[in-house]
Image (cartoon, grey):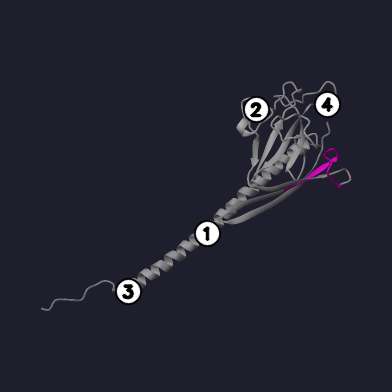
Amino acid sequence: MPANTKQSGYTIPELIVSITLLGIISVSILAIFMNYFVVITRNNTIVDMTTDAQNLLRSTVEELRYGAGVRQTNSISDANGPGGGWNTSNSDFVIIIAMPATDASGNYIIDSLTGSPYNNEFVYFKSGTILYKRTLANTGAVGNSEKTSCPSASASTTCPADTKLIENVSNMIFTLYDQDDISTANALLARSVKIDLTMQRDTFGDPLVLNNNIRVTLRNTF
């Protein structure tokens, strides 16, 4: 009986075609997966940036409303401040907010000479793409719940590190308006403040830009 020379399986041409098709399908699936991954990552980044921006603007608005106004320069000395002191300025991305000093129970600490609360000062400043807040505590306010803060490299138990508020900041512009709703460079005349915040973050070599703004009226005068 003659031997059966017929063998099951694929011929070489069939294998080549099959491998080629599998390669095309695999590349297509990988491309779809990568595109999906990029879209999800970018969407998550936008959500994170939006949340960070809203939290920052909300906390800044609360301090401006609760505070005693905007200062042109810091009246409380800062050994770690820039030469000449801090100055509210959009070109330097700085704003100084005066805040009533309170004790550990949240009660105002009153200056007996003026009958008004002592004021601490909060300095918002941008370093690179990070926005920080430095606290300048009024040394005359006995029992002050705030402590003057320092750059992280100089931080200690008596001088905590500056608060890092938000990353990926491109611009944060503070526009001051007087009682006639006219923009002013004089912080002492400011009755309202508009905050324009721009954040930028690169994802897969493509920058994502988020713009947000809010305007707040300064309510308290101490």
Q: Earlier in the sequence, mark 4 or mark 3?
A: 3
Q: Which residues are magenta?
A: 182-196
Q: Are marks 1 and 3 in contact (CB under 8 Å)?
A: no
Q: CA distance from mark 1 to mark 3?
A: 33 Å
The answer to whether residue 108 is above or below residue 34 is above
In primary-sequence order, the first of circles 1 and 3 is: 3
Whole-number angstrom distance, CA of label 1 to CA of label 4: 59 Å
| Residue under numbered circle 2 | 159
Q: Is 40 placed above or below 193 here?
A: below
Mark 1 touches mark 4? (CB < 8 Å): no
Whole-percent x, y for residue 24 in the image: 43, 68
Kindly identify the amino acid type of the residue bearing the numbered disc 3: Glu
Q: Amino acid at mark 4?
A: Ser
In the image: residue 147, left or right of residue 100: left
Mark 3 vs 2, N-terminal side? 3
The percent position of residue 38, horizontal first and vertical second, equals 54, 57
Q: Which residue is mark 1?
A: 36
Q: Disc 1 or 4, which lies upstream in sequence? A: 1
